[in-house]
């Protein structure tokens, strides 16, 4: 029976080819617009580390000044000070990691390779344990390297390619920011989207070119990049004076596997701040916070407003397209009342008429959906060329999106077809025949 | 008015309520999207048109990063500046820590009295020398430019500030709302709560590095060169010379010292494009959406009107045979569309305001200016009438003889 309805539907679509094309086009445009914007939003709100995003927590401490909060809503500052990062890292019974960014020129021993500027992530070996970036060669540095400020480095795949031609470079040396470093590991491709472990300078950036112990910052006087905010001027002078100030420039994470651990960690943080208060720091009321990965992405508003506005407008756009389709289907089926009346008169049940017309709507939906997917692909290309940044480079339609698109198209056109099909099957059998 | 035939039209419409309602709804939603989209577009456009103050078409910048322990940044800075400034085609150049509109820079809080109890006014900080005003294409509106003796070297870990500063007119207004620019010259402002600086001059216009910042026009210039291994040069050229000089100066500077990298050679034009790319993309996307939407709605109106015309061929023929003129037939369908549009537009006004409220609530969108609503009303009425005209015109061509035939 379904095959027969399908044949009828194809026949009917071909009979009113202009009207049918208009409906298919409307569905396709609506689906295309929706899928393009949904894909962008889907990518921006992706969970970058799904298997443990509920166990990783971003740590915030309120070290801000007595008179004004860090921002209007009295949120704790979005980064921590050098001093707090170091103090907290002393407590190694917790799986914590502190980090910051720097930059430096990389010089290869091979003179033919031109020196180049590299982004540096200064961190602890726990970084690799908590965030699990994949290694191509070697592995993380030893915890002793953090304690003794050893000049060891983990390279990104790209940096290893640039400096060592992609060979296994573990054990080899290179110069970074004027100092000699020994390679202990090389990462494989690693592009968490968003780059959740540090979103303070934008959520959609590539990971850094090299990773090295944060404890090297002071002895090697490595400069600071990223956002550096202070509520008062440093008390001391020179590099160390600046480090020991109330300026925030470091990110801090902790892995907590269950609610009990979370509670325990919060009381540890509060006790730490109380202890610092006794030393004359932290003039504000207690305002510490831990946020899981997805909570932190929410707080930092990683999904851009524009992307969301466009998604809502696209949904309204689809609504207009569907209203349009309902109107056109109604008109189309209304011209067929004679047909329907005849079929009803010779014994077709209402249900059969309904099935026939809903099949036709669904067929229009499927064609519209497929065409909509093509339009969405074009739309995504357009988004890429217009934005041309890291976000758009990673926007792509995957299988989930294809399924969603087709499902959305079929469901919405079947819904749109319901009323016209209902109207069609309520044509009384006899009245229409009389006039013929 | 009597021959607008409102009665018969209304009765006919009521017989096909759903069809008419669908079109009315479509018009309402279309209006909602279009009015809000146009409003967003206009707002983004005016945001993009804000002037940076620079001679944008003829300015570029580059970063030089020295490495190795024997890199003498002070000597290199002096020699570089001499070299760049004496290059034919260069109007002027400065060493500077940050570039307007580029997205990264340095900001501080300024107050008019010392102490941390006073709320400060945010400003971007540019560290420059006495060539800054000429390089920035900035005009002095009060006070005077830095003199050569004002300029000092800032060492890598130095955190104090020079004794004098030049600020923008907008910053002067925010700091001293009740004083004229001439009165602000010579005043003391405090940077980072406690450190005094005397305002030496005031310039007309210059933008901070962050285009989304609400203090975009707040800029403080301080007279200093930076003895940092990594630094930027901002270079203003004579018209038409920018692109040639970009390549030749990059080469010259790179050859000057082997142990440094010249990178990020960028024009101000491309920096502006990059910073506003999100907004120009939004404008393009919304424009395409509006055009497609209007098209679809118009096609929907045409479809429904054609359907009505086809269904009533016999009645139209009869009316014509009974003496109705062609224009009366056209008028019938135009008025029918007008009535449907009216319902749609009334609903549309409500929905438009509703969506605007939602956008205000959830996103950083401002309240709609009132005149967008009547503009939207006029637009949608016109779209409806234009779309209805084709089918109405075809209806008028139906021959009166049709009435005599049975279909």
Image (cartoon, coloured by chain):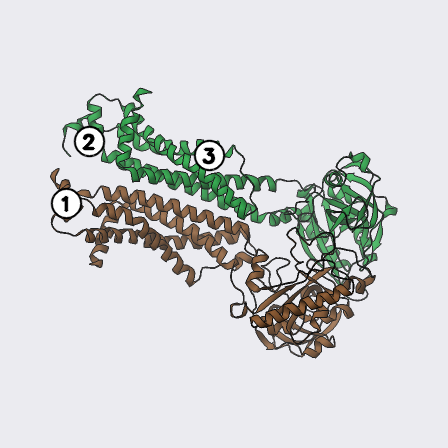
Chain colours: A brown, B green
Q: Quadrant of residue B350?
A: top left
- Mark 3, mark 2: which one is toward the viewer? 3
Q: Residue at x 81, y 63 (%)?
A: A241
Q: Quadrant of residue A402?
A: bottom left
Q: Is residue A69 left or right of residue A130?
A: right
Quadrant of the rendering where the C terminus of chain A is positioned: top left
Chain of the residue where label 1 is placed in the rendered structure: A
- Judged from the image, the secondary structure of the residue bearing numbered disc 3 is helix
Task: Say which mark, if any, is on residue A429.
Answer: 1
Q: Residue furthest right?
A: B149
| Percent x, y of residue A401 | 42, 59
Quadrant of the rendering where the N terminus of chain A is positioned: bottom left
Who is closer to the viewer here, A11 or B120?
A: B120
Mark 1 on the same chain as mark 2: no
**Whole-number angstrom distance, CA of label 1 to CA of label 2:** 23 Å
Chain of the residue where label 2 is placed in the rendered structure: B
Task: Say which mark, if any, is on residue B376.
Answer: 3
Chain of the residue where label 3 is placed in the rendered structure: B
Label 3 neighbour load within 10 Å: few <14, some 14-19, many 20+ = many
Q: Earlier in the sequence, mark 3 or mark 2?
A: 2
| Percent x, y of residue A406 | 36, 57
Q: Quadrant of residue B145?
A: top right
Query: What residue would you read off at disc 2?
Result: B314
- Reply above or below: B295 against A144: above
- Judged from the image, the secondary structure of the residue bearing numbered disc 1 is loop
**Whole-number angstrom distance, CA of label 3 to CA of label 1:** 46 Å
- Judged from the image, the secondary structure of the residue bearing numbered disc 2 is helix
| Percent x, y of residue B213 | 65, 47
Q: Residue at x 80, y 65 (%)?
A: A240
**Whole-number angstrom distance, CA of label 3 to CA of label 2:** 37 Å
């Amino acid at each position: 029976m379904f095959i027969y309805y399908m044949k009828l539907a194809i026949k009917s679509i071909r009979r009113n080819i202009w009207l049918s094309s208009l409906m298919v086009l409307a569905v396709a445009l609506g689906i295309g617009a929706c899928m393009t914007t949904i894909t962008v939003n889907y990518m921006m709100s992706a969970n970058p580390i799904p298997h443990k995003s509920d166990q990783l927590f971003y740590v915030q401490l309120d070290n801000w000044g007595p008179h004004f909060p860090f921002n209007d809503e009295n949120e704790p500052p979005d980064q921590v000070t050098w001093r707090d990062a170091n103090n907290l890292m002393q407590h190694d019974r917790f799986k914590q990691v502190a980090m910051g960014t720097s930059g430096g020129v990389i010089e290869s021993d091979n003179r033919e390779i031109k020196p180049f500027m590299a982004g540096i992530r200064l961190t602890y070996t726990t970084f690799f344990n908590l965030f699990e970036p994949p290694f191509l060669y070697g592995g993380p540095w030893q915890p002793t390297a953090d304690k003794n400020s050893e000049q060891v480095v983990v390279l990104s795949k790209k940096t290893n390619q640039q400096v060592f031609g992609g060979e296994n470079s573990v054990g080899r040396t290179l110069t970074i920011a004027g100092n000699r470093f020994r390679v202990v590991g090389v990462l494989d491709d690693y592009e968490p989207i968003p780059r959740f472990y540090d979103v303070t300078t934008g959520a959609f950036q590539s990971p850094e070119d090299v990773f090295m112990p944060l404890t090297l910052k002071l002895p090697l006087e490595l400069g600071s990049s990223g956002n550096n905010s202070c509520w008062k001027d440093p008390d001391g002078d020179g590099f160390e004076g600046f480090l020991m100030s109330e300026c925030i420039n470091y990110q801090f994470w902790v892995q907590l596997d269950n609610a009990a651990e979370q509670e325990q960690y919060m009381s540890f943080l509060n006790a730490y701040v109380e202890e610092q208060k006794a030393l004359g720091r932290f003039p504000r009321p207690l305002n510490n916070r831990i946020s899981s990965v997805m909570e932190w992405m929410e707080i930092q508003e990683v999904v851009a407003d524009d992307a969301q506005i466009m998604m809502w407008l696209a949904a309204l756009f689809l609504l207009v397209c569907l209203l349009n389709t309902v109107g056109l289907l109604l008109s189309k089926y209304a011209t067929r009342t004679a047909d329907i009346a005849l079929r009803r008169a010779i014994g077709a049940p209402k249900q059969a008429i309904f099935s026939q017309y809903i099949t036709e709507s669904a067929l229009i939906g499927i064609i519209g959906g497929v065409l909509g997917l093509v339009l969405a692909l074009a739309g995504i290309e357009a988004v890429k060329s217009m934005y041309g940044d890291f976000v758009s480079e990673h926007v792509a339609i995957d299988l989930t999106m294809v399924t969603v698109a087709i499902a959305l198209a079929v469901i919405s056109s079947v819904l749109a077809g319901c009323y016209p099909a209902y109207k069609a099957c309520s044509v009384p059998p006899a009245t229409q025949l009389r006039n013929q | 008015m009597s021959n607008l035939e409102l009665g018969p039209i209304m009765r006919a419409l009521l017989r096909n309520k759903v069809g008419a309602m669908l079109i009315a709804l479509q018009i309402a939603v279309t209006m909602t999207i279009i009015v809000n989209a146009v409003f967003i577009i206009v707002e983004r456009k005016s945001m993009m048109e804000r002037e940076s103050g620079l001679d944008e078409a003829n300015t570029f910048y580059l970063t030089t990063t020295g490495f190795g322990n024997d890199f003498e940044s002070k000597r290199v800075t002096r020699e570089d500046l001499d070299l760049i400034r004496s290059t034919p085609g260069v109007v002027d150049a400065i060493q500077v820590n940050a570039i307007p509109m580029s997205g990264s820079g340095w900001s501080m809080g300024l107050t008019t009295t010392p102490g941390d109890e006073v709320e400060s006014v945010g400003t971007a900080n540019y560290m420059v020398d006495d060539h800054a005003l000429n390089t920035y294409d900035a005009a002095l509106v009060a006070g005077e430019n830095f003199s050569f003796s004002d300029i000092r070297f800032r060492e890598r870990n130095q955190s104090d500030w020079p004794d004098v500063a030049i600020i923008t007119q907008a910053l002067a207004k925010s700091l001293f709302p009740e004083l004229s620019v001439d009165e602000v010259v010579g005043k003391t402002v405090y940077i980072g709560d406690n450190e005094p600086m005397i305002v030496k001059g005031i310039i007309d216009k210059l933008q901070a590095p962050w285009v989304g910042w609400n203090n975009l026009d707040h800029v403080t210039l301080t007279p200093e060169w930076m003895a940092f291994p990594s630094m930027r040069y901002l270079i203003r050229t004579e018209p038409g010379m920018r692109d040639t000089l970009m390549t030749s100066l990059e080469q010259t500077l790179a050859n000057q010292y082997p142990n440094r990298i010249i990178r990020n050679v960028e024009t101000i034009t491309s920096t502006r494009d990059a910073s506003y790319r999100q907004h120009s993309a939004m404008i393009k996307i919304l424009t395409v959406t509006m055009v497609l939407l209007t098209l679809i709605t118009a096609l929907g109106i045409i479809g429904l009107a054609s359907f009505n015309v086809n269904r009533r061929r016999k009645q139209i023929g009869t009316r014509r045979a009974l003496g109705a003129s062609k224009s009366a037939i056209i008028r019938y369908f135009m008025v029918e569309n007008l009535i449907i549009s009216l319902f749609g537009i009334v609903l549309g006004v409500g929905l438009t305001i509703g969506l605007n409220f939602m956008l205000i609530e959830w996103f950083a969108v401002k309240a709609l200016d009132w005149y967008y609503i009547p503009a939207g009303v006029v637009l949608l009425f016109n779209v409806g009438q234009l779309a209805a005209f084709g089918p109405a015109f075809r209806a008028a061509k139906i021959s009166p003889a049709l009435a005599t035939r049975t279909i």
